[in-house]
Amino acid sequence: MSMMNYKLLNFYIHGDNRGKLISLENLKEIPFEVKRVYYMFDTLPNESRGFHAHKNLEQIIIAIDGACTFLLDDGTRKEKVLLNRPDVGLYIGKNIWREMHDFSYGCKLVVLASEYYDEKEYIRNYDEFLKSLKDGADK
């Protein structure tokens, strides 16, 4: 586990010759109550997404098909994380800048979020993100 507010979660695969299944439950495999689920698809390899942070939202992102690279930034360190397995979820806590790059063709991501959508929850400007971290440290 990193010192940064993220971690990879390994999910248990149930399966036999008919196929595989992963079950995710609030406050068990998912360390928060899920209030929103959304997914990304039809991604293109030459496009990037994200470029924001959240003030209080927690997320788990799962690449259910394909792969992409996350660039995570806590204002001090930057780390890259490859998501390419449906049995691994990327937990991202609050105040982490995230960018998604290097999508494989047709990558599909599912996102589990701890809060309902609220545009005021987003920090979409990197300089404002850095300022919010400094302001928080000054309190």
Image: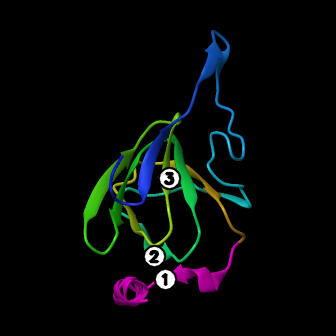
* Label 3: how many Cα within 10 Å (few below 14, some 14–19, many 20+): many
The residue that mark 2 highlights is 52
Q: Are marks 1 and 2 in contact (CB under 8 Å)?
A: yes
How packed is label 2: few (under 14 Cα within 10 Å), some, or many (20 or more)?
A: some
Is there a contact, CB below 8 Å, between mark 3 and mark 2? no
Outermost residue, left direction? 77
Q: Which residue is mark 3?
A: 91
Task: Label 1: state its secondary structure.
Answer: strand
The amino acid sitting under disc 1 is Ile
Dot 3 amino acid type: Tyr
- Residue 123: give its label: 1
* Point 57% across, 62% down: residue: 58
- Residue type indicated by callout 2: His
Residue 48 visible? The answer is no
**Rendered location of residue 71, percent (x, y):** 33, 61
Using the numbered discs, state the Cα–Cα distance from disc 3 to disc 2 in whole angstroms.
15 Å
In the displayed structure image, the side of residue 35 where residue 75 appears, left or right? left
Question: Which segment is the magenta one?
Answer: 117-139
